């Protein structure tokens, strides 16, 4: 076992406070890959058909994927330093606040967030993610999340670029109980109680725990809490049966057949909100008027969950030949979605195709000190350099609130 602390310190020294990360691929056995993650066509089932197709790439992750039959490190990001590799989770455990900041380490004792691309041919079943209290009952953590649909990843929308969210106002809990009673009868009809919203590249959503949602088929950048809990309330999707175990897996075992309990687990007020879109929809908001300087930094994920800022995200676009210094309130994970250039001491290159297991130059993790002092991003190519970055709790005191995009219209 290599000395992770020593390797991590050396990697940060060479990278100027920035780690190079290898791609982290995650399969889902119950979904069909959308094939837009730039993975080689021969590699979408690199883990075997029994594991399912690869439809997710995770960024800056210290959270393991909760997949049946998965190895212990599935979902964990690996730092690449020369010929050595070690997990970002191990590095954080060794160096603590040196990587993620003292405030986050003191409160959470881990990097408590991560982001991903998920990419599916069709929609995901209508589901919710447990809140902190519910997840604690099964030894897990709750999971608020957010969405942004990068234009660079969405040249095509695949089969269903719409997302059902929440429940129609006037829906009763008994209506949902009856859907769960019909689980083994085929389609249990829960989508009849919901509304689908058309998804547009360059926009996003903020989704608190306990709110039903059935993500559509756009490639989605998803900053979220570091947990993989969920409960699926839809029995069939695109003609495929959803195992009932995916409804109950993150609820206490003695409640698996208590349909009223499963319905009461939903945040009813938020699910039947008559102003659901007003309270959850996001559009990019520029951080400042810097277009004349050759770059634009935009907020793409913002807003509070339960009164707390748990995560946020930005999209930086740098024109060819330009460079800028970006400062942030805390550590962040970065993924490049267009162009080439440099971030600090490290090269950035957006790949056209990636082989499973290969190391790319599109992903980095910027440690707290470097983020606060400022990182230089330079475009050395002939097209815009575009990177997405997500930050942890309370890192963005100047972030907008949900709905603030309307003030710019």
Image (cartoon, rainbow, N blue to C red):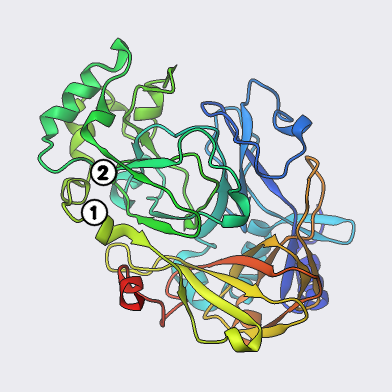
User: Is residue 91 rendered to the left or right of residue 154?
Assistant: right
Q: Residue under circle 1?
A: 276
User: Is residue 293 rendered to the left or right of residue 239?
Assistant: right
Numbered disc 2: secondary structure: loop
> Where residue 263 appears, x then y in whole percent?
20, 34
Task: Give the distance between the C-alpha atoms of the residues marked 1 and 2, in whole angstroms.
Answer: 8 Å
Is 68 situated above or below 363? above
Q: Residue under circle 2?
A: 166
Q: Nearer the viewer, residue 106 or 165?
A: 165
- The quadrant of the picture occupied by the C terminus is bottom left
Closer to the N terminus: mark 1 or mark 2? 2
Q: Are marks 1 and 2 in contact (CB under 8 Å)?
A: yes
Q: Residue furthest top?
A: 185
- Is residue 215 visible in this depiction of the protein? no
| Residue found 79% across the figure and 70% down from its top | 382
> Where residue 392 appears, x then y in whole percent?
49, 68
> Where residue 315 appears, x then y in whole percent?
56, 69
Numbered disc 1: secondary structure: helix
């Amino acid at each position: 076992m290599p000395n992770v602390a020593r390797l991590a310190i050396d990697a940060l020294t060479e990278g100027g406070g920035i780690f190079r990360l290898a791609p982290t691929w995650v399969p889902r056995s119950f979904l069909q890959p959308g094939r837009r993650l730039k993975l080689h066509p021969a590699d979408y089932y690199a883990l075997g058909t029994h594991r399912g197709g690869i439809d997710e790439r995770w960024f800056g992750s210290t959270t393991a994927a909760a997949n049946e039959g998965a190895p212990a490190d599935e979902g964990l990001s690996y730092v690449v330093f020369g010929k050595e590799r070690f997990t970002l989770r191990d590095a954080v455990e060794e160096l603590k606040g040196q990587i993620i900041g003292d405030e986050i380490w003191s409160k959470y004792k881990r990097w408590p967030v991560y982001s991903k691309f998920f990419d599916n041919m069709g929609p995901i079943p209508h589901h919710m993610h447990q809140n902190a209290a519910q997840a604690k009952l099964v030894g897990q953590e709750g999971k608020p999340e957010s969405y942004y649909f990068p234009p660079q990843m969405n040249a095509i929308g695949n089969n269903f670029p719409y997302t059902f969210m929440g429940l129609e106002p006037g829906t009763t809990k008994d209506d949902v109980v009856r859907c769960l009673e019909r689980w083994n009868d085929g389609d249990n009809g829960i989508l009849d109680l919901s509304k689908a919203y058309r998804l547009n590249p360059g926009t996003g959503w903020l989704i608190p725990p306990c709110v039903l949602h059935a993500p559509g088929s756009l490639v989605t950048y998803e900053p979220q809490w570091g947990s993989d809990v969920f409960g699926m309330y839809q029995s069939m999707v695109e003609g495929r049966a959803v195992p009932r175990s995916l409804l109950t897996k993150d609820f206490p075992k003695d409640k698996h057949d208590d349909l009223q309990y499963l319905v009461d687990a939903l945040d009813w007020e938020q699910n039947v909100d008559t102003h659901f879109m007003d309270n959850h929809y996001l559009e990019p908001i520029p951080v400042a008027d810097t277009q004349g300087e050759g770059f634009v930094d935009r907020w793409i994920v913002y807003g509070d969950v339960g009164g707390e800022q748990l995560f946020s995200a930005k999209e930086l676009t740098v024109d060819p030949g330009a460079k800028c210094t970006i400062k942030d309130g805390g550590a962040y994970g970065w993924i490049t979605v267009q162009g080439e250039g440099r971030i600090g001491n490290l090269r950035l290159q957006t790949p056209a195709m990636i082989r499973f297991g290969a190391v790319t130059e599109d992903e980095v993790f910027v440690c707290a000190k470097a983020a606060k002092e400022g990182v230089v991003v330079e475009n050395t190519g002939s097209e815009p350099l575009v990177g997405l970055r997500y930050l942890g709790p309370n890192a963005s005191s100047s972030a907008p609130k949900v709905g603030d995009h309307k003030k710019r219209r």
